[in-house]
Image (cartoon, rainbow, N blue to C red):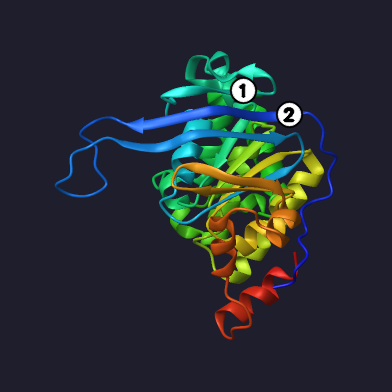
């Protein structure tokens, strides 16, 4: 894995997303372990900022609270306390009927494409339906817009007729990206978007996200447990441990000179100089 990172060269100005002192606790009775009915403090006083046009990488081990934080930032859960703003607007004010006001600002790309897509409908139908739900375009023009969006993620228009099970994992992830893009959001929240893909396909999807960022001026919150991938795509990085952000900063500054013991521990666990899969991953990601 080369040492330098290749975060997209886009203009960064202004604040797209901000979280201030977020707390989230599961209610009493919830337990991560059988036989232990107790509450659980999943997010503890988290603050972060995502600037317009940048990629902020959020990295930490599995179970540290990354996905719970993502669910707060996209509105699936309400924080116990703290506040979230999008482009300076209070988050709650954007949660208008059916979350349409929020959708134009922020869309989510998740790891589980089979779970995110309806297996009973063609992917084209699902893209057109997304446009209809948000009142975008006219019925006669929505299929054309869906085809154009597919082309922007390197999928042929003929793929609109396919069902999710007829597509590869990489193709399904491109469909998920297209469905997010079709409403023209300003922020993409990418929650482990390539962790379920083969190494070669990972590189393709990461390249696609960086190209889309350059073309559309998108802000990306990129959540992953993979330190190497986060290093390659992020302008800045936030390190998460046990529900807290323990270190933030410019990617190369944090990776070259970590100041928190957990960050140093996380970086020391990255495989170096191994053959086989690690060597293959390095070769593929060098194309980024």
Residue 28 image offset from top left, x and y in percent: 23, 31
Across and down, in percent, residue 278 comes to 59, 78
Per the image, label 2 sits on a secondary structure element best described as strand
Image coords of residue 185 (percent x, y): 67, 32
Name, please, the residue furthest toward the left: 35
Relative to 76, does residue 222 appear above or below in the rendering?
Answer: below
Q: Are marks 2 and 1 in contact (CB under 8 Å)?
A: yes
Cα gap from disc 2 to disc 1, whole angstroms: 9 Å
Q: Is residue 117 visible?
A: no
* 226 lies left or right of 206: left
Whichever of labels 2 and 1 marks the residue nearer the N terminus, that label is 2
Q: Is residue 218 visible?
A: yes
35 on left or right of 125:
left
Q: From the image, which quarter does the N terminus lie in?
A: bottom right
SS class, disc 1: strand
Front position in the image: 227 or 147: 227
- Residue 15, label in figure: 2
Label 1 Cα crowd, 10 Å radius (few <14 / some 14-19 / many 20+): some
Q: Which residue is mark 1?
A: 85
In the figure, is residue 83 to the left or right of 250?
left
């Amino acid at each position: 894995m080369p040492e330098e990172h290749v975060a997209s060269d886009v203009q960064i100005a202004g604040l797209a997303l901000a979280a201030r002192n977020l707390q989230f606790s599961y209610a009493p009775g919830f337990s991560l372990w059988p036989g232990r009915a107790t509450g659980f403090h999943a997010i503890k006083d988290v603050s972060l900022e995502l600037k317009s046009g940048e990629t902020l990488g959020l990295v930490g081990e599995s179970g540290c609270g990354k996905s719970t934080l993502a669910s707060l930032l996209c509105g699936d859960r309400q924080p116990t306390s703290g506040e979230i703003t999008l482009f300076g607007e209070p988050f709650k004010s954007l949660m208008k009927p059916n979350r349409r006001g929020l959708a134009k600002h922020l869309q989510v790309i998740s790891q589980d494409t089979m779970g995110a897509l309806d297996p009973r409908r063609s992917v084209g139908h699902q893209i057109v339906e997304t446009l209809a739900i948000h009142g975008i375009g006219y019925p006669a023009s929505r299929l054309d817009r869906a085809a154009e969006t597919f082309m922007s993620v390197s999928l042929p228009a003929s793929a609109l007729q396919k069902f999710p099970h007829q597509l590869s994992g990489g193709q399904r992830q491109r469909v998920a990206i297209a469905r997010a893009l079709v409403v023209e959001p300003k922020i993409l929240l990418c929650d482990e978007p390539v962790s379920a893909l083969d190494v070669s396909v990972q590189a393709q999807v990461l390249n696609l996200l960086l190209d889309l960022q350059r073309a559309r001026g998108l802000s990306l919150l990129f959540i992953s447990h993979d330190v190497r991938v986060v290093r390659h795509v992020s302008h800045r990085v936030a390190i998460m441990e046990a529900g807290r952000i323990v270190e933030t900063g410019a990617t190369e500054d944090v990776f070259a000179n970590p100041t928190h013991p957990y960050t140093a521990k996380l970086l020391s666990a990255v495989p170096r100089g191994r053959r086989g899969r690690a060597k293959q991953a390095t070769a593929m990601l060098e194309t980024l």
